[in-house]
Image (cartoon, grey):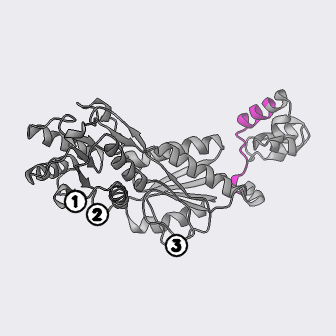
Amino acid sequence: MTKGNKPEHNRPITQKTLAEYLQLSPSTVSLVMNDTPRGRLIPEATRQRIIEAAAKFDYRPDFYAKYLNSRRSYTIAVILPEVREQYAASILAGIDSTLTKEKYLYFTASHHDNPDLIREYPRRFLERAAEGFLSVNTTFPVLPGRPWISIGNHAKVEGVPRFAIDNYCGGKMAMQHLYDLGHRRIAVIKGPPWRRAATERWRGIRDTARDLGITFKKQLVRELHSGNTPTEVSAPQEGYLCTTELIKTGAAFTGLICFNDVTAIGAISALRDAGLQTPLDVSVIGFDDIASAGYLSPTLTTFMQPLEELGGLAAAHLVAAIEGREELTHEELVEPRLIQRQSTRPILPSEA
């Protein structure tokens, strides 16, 4: 092609022919089209000429050729159970914010707990040149062969950094909050035994109670079981039933720690139906800080899980590891944050 001639529309446009048309060097076109730091030093008028010509002739850099040359795709795979779930969606928001700032692309895949998809997705993403993996409450059966960080409260995988909410700390903080308000007779509705978060929160509650010299009465501890089968009652209803059982034992309590906010909603309803007021008779704590927690009557004291922060931290560490700025060994437990509202109150020593 003669220098400066218009590229023929029936021929694929290449970097070389575009450069000839613009009477620039191929390296100059490459620097601009690949948005490199050096490319940003090129005069703006020249950059604009290149971008406009590329759009006019539908020129795009060959991704696979670029990848083979640099071994960089700037692409992350994010694999999770279901993107619509609020827990996963909040984490994904933090991942999105960080990877966008770092100019990384990411692809998301939901497996809906299908073991075949959990096994196949890493291979599929490797075929698409993913440089790293972020998994939310998902454990791959084998290491994917690229940097991998797991996010969530599922079991830790040897050699794989895990970023999670510190549920043990959350349990400790809930117990300490009621103790600091003067409560000594405290009931607990534990989460389902199959949930790791429930086990960790209960351990934090129990250990802190022991350190504070409080012994739990067996009749003042109940455990949720919802979610094991589709026919079981919902969490608010189960919270209602568990609280009704606690009241029927006749054992007095002034504080109630619930596994989550929807359980606490059911608990407050049961207390009200039994003629007890929250927090005048029983202070109630939830966990999660769901959207309605601040609009209930009374508004609910709870613990906010900083899930966006969690996702952002994990994504930032993965990028740093891919780029060789950090070792892929860091692990992070993020503390929940107490949101004190109307459902808990201090009590007098005579009420304890």
Q: Residues within 10 Å of mark 3 (few under 14, many from 20)?
A: few
Q: CA distance from mark 2 to mark 1?
A: 7 Å
Residue 116 is a magenta residue? no
Task: Give the numbered dot on residue 196.
Answer: none
Q: Residues within 10 Å of mark 1 (few under 14, many from 20)?
A: some
Residue linked to disc 2? 193
**Secondary-structure class at tag 1:** loop
Name the side, left or right, on which 201 lies relative to 225: right
Circle 3: residue type: Val
Residues rendered magenta in the picture: 48-64
Image location of residue 327, percent across then percent down: 68, 61
Place of residue 75 in the rendered image (x, y in percent of width and height, measured from the top left): 62, 53
Q: Quadrant of residue 222?
A: bottom left
Residue 115, compared with residue 256, is above or below; it is below
Location of the C terminus (image quadrant): top left
> Helix, strand, or loop for circle 2?
loop
Tell me the residue at 74%/56% (across/down).
Answer: 65
Task: Evaluate whether residue 18 shows in this view.
Answer: no
Q: Whole-Å distance between the Cαs marked 2 and 3?
A: 26 Å
Magenta stretch: dominant secondary structure: helix
Find out whether residue 62 is within the magenta segment: yes
Image check: 61 left or right of 249? right
What residue is pinned by disc 3? 142
Q: Position of residue 152 (x, y in %)?
A: 45, 56
Label pair 2/1, CB-CB below 8 angstroms: yes
Q: Nearer the viewer, residue 22 or 194?
A: 194
Query: Identity of the amino acid at label 1?
Result: His
**Of marks 2 and 3, which one's residue comes earlier in the chain?**
3
| Residue highlighted by disc 1 | 225
Q: Nearer the viewer, residue 287 or 142?
A: 287
| Mark 2 residue type | Pro
